[in-house]
Image (cartoon, rainbow, N blue to C red):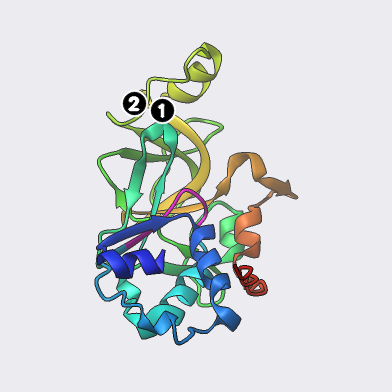
Amino acid sequence: MAPDVSRYRAYYTLAPNFGYDWLLRSLKDGRLTDLDRDLDLDCLRCALSGAEPVRPDVLDAVARRLAPIGFRPDVGAPGYGLAEATLMVTGTPCGSGPTVRRFDRGALEASRAVPAPDGVDLVGCGRPAGADVRIVDPATSRPLESGHVGEIWVGGDSVADGYLGDPRATAEHFAAVTADGDGPFLRTGDLGFLRDGELYVTGRAKDLIIINGRNIHPRTSNASVRQPTPPPAPAPPSL
C-alpha cells in the first residue's frame, strides 16, 4: 500500500483493518528500514478503514509508525458499510481524523453508552453518508435514542431490493418496519449506537452472549485488551 501511495502521489487509499495490521507486521521489527524511509506519504489525504471492525490500537500504531514518512493522524478515516447497502453507510470526512472514545463496560452490558475514563475504547465510524441510519430494539422494533445500543437499521436509495432468488431472506432482512411505522429498512444484524451523530459499532447480534441479564459483546469485552503484535512477516525468498 505505502509504496504505491508514494509512487503515484495518491490522495486516497482504503483497506479493511487487517490490511493496516498486515502493513504493521510487514515492517521489520516494527521499525522503518532505510528503504522504507525513502517513501513519502505526505500526499495522502484520506486512509479509509472499513468492511470489518476497526481496532483503535491499529489506528494508533499506523499513525505512529508511519509518521516519519509523512503519515498524519488526521488521515485515518473509519467507516461502516455493507454490500447490501452498496456500499458506504457512514464515513469520516477526510482530514477530520478518527474519533476514539472510552465507554463504561458495565453500561454497555446494559445496552447504554456512557463515557468513562476507564473503560472500553471504541472507534467512531463517522456520520451517515446519504443513508437513513436508525438504532432499533431488535425485539420490539422500537427506535432507540442516542446513546442506547440496538440493532443498526439502514434505509435509503442505495439499499438493494433483496437477495436474488431468495424471497424468504429478502423478506427477513430488507422489509423491516419500525414500531411507529417507518420503513422499509435493511436489518444489518450489527449492534451499535449513535452518539453526537456518529455511529459506533459494538458487535454482531448473533454473537451476543446474555449472562444473568448482562449483554456481553465479544468485541467490546476484548476491546480494552491490547492485542499482541504478531511476529514480523518473513522476508521473501531471494531470486
Secondary structure at numbered mark 2: loop
Q: Is residue 25 magenta?
A: no
Identify the main secondary structure in magenta.
loop
- Residue furthest out toward the right: 212
Q: Mark 2 — residue?
A: 182
Q: Quadrant of the C terminus?
A: bottom right
Q: Residue 191: percent from the left, percent from the top? A: 52, 45
Q: Are marks 1 and 2 in contact (CB under 8 Å)?
A: yes
Instruction: Identify which amino acid the numbered label 2 is placed on.
Output: Asp
50 in magenta:
yes
Q: CA distance from mark 1 to mark 2?
A: 5 Å
Where are the magenta residues, as a range? 47-54
- Circle 1 SS class: loop
Tell me the residue that label 1 is attached to. 178
Query: Going by the image, does 42 lie left or right of 181?
Result: left
Residue found 55% across the figure and 65% down from its top: 22
Q: Is residue 146 visible?
A: yes
Indicate the quadrant containing the N terminus: top left, top right, bottom left or bottom right: bottom left
Residue 156 is situated, as x and y percent measured from the top left of the image, at 29, 31
